Image (tube, helix red, strand yellow):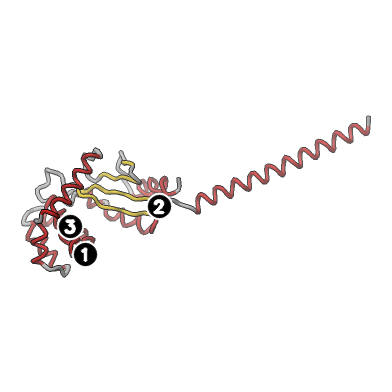
Amino acid sequence: MKKTLQLFLWIAFAIVVIGALIYSLGGSNSGEEVQASQSDPTPVTILKYSDYQCPACKMYIPLQQQLKADFGDLVTIEYRHFPLRGHQYAQLAAQAAEAARVQGRYREMHDRIFEGQEVWSRGNAESIFIEYAGELGLDQDQFEEDLHSEEVVQIVNRQQAEGERRMVQATPTFFINGQMIRQTPQSYEQFKSLVEMFVYQ
């Protein structure tokens, strides 16, 4: 009887030790998986359908810049023209950005147009855009020619048509990795958390 009890206790002890070892190894693997997922983020692309005459679109520029500062190369932000029909100079502003792209200064013109939004929105927009071109060191004659060229107009129109096919109705509208964000983030923290869901999925 005594030997049987001792044998039982040894078996029970062995089961406990083996169970603890298996749990320890499983926990370690789980931790490694979590660590691996956190150290292997997924790059994301954010598409912004935007209107240069839209104040809300301008408001998101600092948030986009902060995303790039926080995520670096993990986040790519691409602009898509979506000039709203109720904004008198939005189409021309989009064409000005594309005319600057012809000379390799799209980003600079994009930023300059948004910076001066309150000025050119009141009128005399074309002259102001040509002035911006001079400030950026562009060939103004070429800029004026490209501003109304069929090629530039078609670029803007194609992007707007693309947005309409994707059910864009207002600006700004964001897509992350092709998925429309139905509720536009109301703060940087909301935007950052949304991006993190895609980066660390």
Counting residues from the start of the chain, the first of labels 1 and 3 encountered is 3
Q: Left of 76 or right of it: where is 28? A: right
Q: Are marks 3 and 2 in contact (CB under 8 Å)?
A: no
- Residue type beneath disc 2: Pro
Query: Closer to the N terminus: mark 3 or mark 2?
Result: 2
Residue at image location 30% in from the left, 38% down from the top:
182
Nearer the N terminus, badge 1 or badge 2? Answer: 2
Choose top left, top right, bottom left or bottom right for residue 73: bottom left
**Which residue, given by chain and number where applicable, does mark 3 sit on?**
98
Q: In the figure, 11 relative to 113: above or below?
A: above
- Label 1, label 3: how far apart the Cα atoms are: 9 Å
Split into 4 quadrants, where in the image is the N terminus? Answer: top right
Query: Does residue 178 appear left or right of residue 158 in this picture?
Result: right
Looking at the image, residue 112 sits to the left or right of residue 178; the answer is: left
Which residue is the site of mark 1? 104
Q: Amino acid at mark 3?
A: Glu
What residue is shown with label 2?
43
| Crowd rating for badge 2 (residues with CA inside 10 Å; few <14, some 14–19, many 20+) | some
Q: Element under label 3?
A: helix
